[in-house]
Image (cartoon, rainbow, N blue to C red):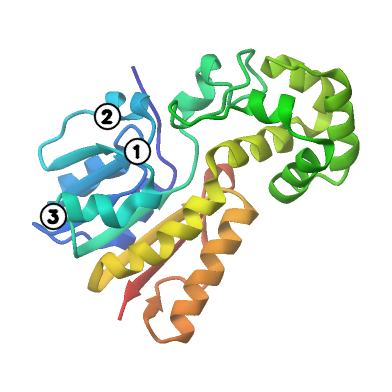
Amino acid sequence: MHYHNPVLLQEAVAFLAVIHGSKYIDCTLGGGGHTAEIIRLGGIVLGLDQDPEALSACPDLQGLTKVRSNFSHLTEVAGRYGFSPVSGILIDLGLSQHQIDSSHRGFSFQKNGPLDMRMDPDLPHTAATLINQLSTNQLTRIFKDFGEIPVAKHLSQKIVSQRPLTTTQDLLKIAGKWSQQAFQALRMAVNDELGALNSVLPQAYELLSPSGRLVVISFHSLEDRIVKIEFKRLFEQKSVTLLNLKPLFGEKSAKLRAYVKN
């Protein structure tokens, strides 16, 4: 089964400037596309993914250590497996095509399935939990903050008046033209995506050896804003040298930012 074609594959690996025999961390292993290229160039990789389906789909490559974990635990996992310090770290924040296409995961409004949206199936709350249990004000905050939906309150009121909702189609019928943003907002809330990103960036900096490189690929403005602010903070402290002053753009709204540690 084909799992995923990573966006900006060659560009991301080029920014890592892989050194033969050096250690790298792929924080979002997915189907292993980026990792396979790093290993082909001689790197040794620790690959993290919180999604067990992703770990199963990724081949067992020589030079790869696979670990099921959210990248918010990066320091702990890297220390446990002897990947500290490392020469490079890659964080690709996109959903895989496999996750989107798997109707039972509930990530896509284009496929009918349960309102789940958990990247880690052991997480306690699904999207249905949030939809059916949160107050109008709480849902409004999620749709406004994570989906940037201008009619967030009206949408939340409609949802509350028509719940319980159990399937992606139930939500699609109510959200209408705001479905893409609503699904994004719920997914980000269920998986605490921005919290994890805020957590991993300083950990990544500390794990890098001098001249080590961090490459981050984001897919929407909320993620990119966090990455941009953190990179700017480190640059102004003269802790890093930015490898691209403006992001490199790819398919599906992808933006790549990279730095080298001073």
* Disc 2: which residue: 58
Give the spatial CA distance, label 2 vs label 3.
Answer: 21 Å
Tag in front: 2 or 3? 3
Q: Can residue 246 be seen in this view?
A: no
First reached walking from the N terminus: tag 1 or tag 2: 1
Q: Which residue is drawn at 18% across and 50% down?
A: 80
Residue 217 location, x and y as percent?
46, 53
Give the spatial CA distance, label 3 vs label 1.
Answer: 18 Å
* Disc 3: which residue: 82
Q: Which label number is shown at residue 49?
A: 1
Residue 21 location, x and y as percent?
8, 57
Residue 70 location, x and y as percent?
38, 43
Q: Can residue 125 be seen in this view?
A: yes
Tag in front: 1 or 2? 1
Instruction: Tell me: residue 209, above or below residue 38.
Output: below
Secondary structure under the numbered disc 2 in the rendered image: loop
Instruction: Tell me: residue 96, above or below residue 45.
Output: above
Query: What residue type is disc 2 on?
Result: Cys
Secondary structure under the numbered disc 1 in the rendered image: strand
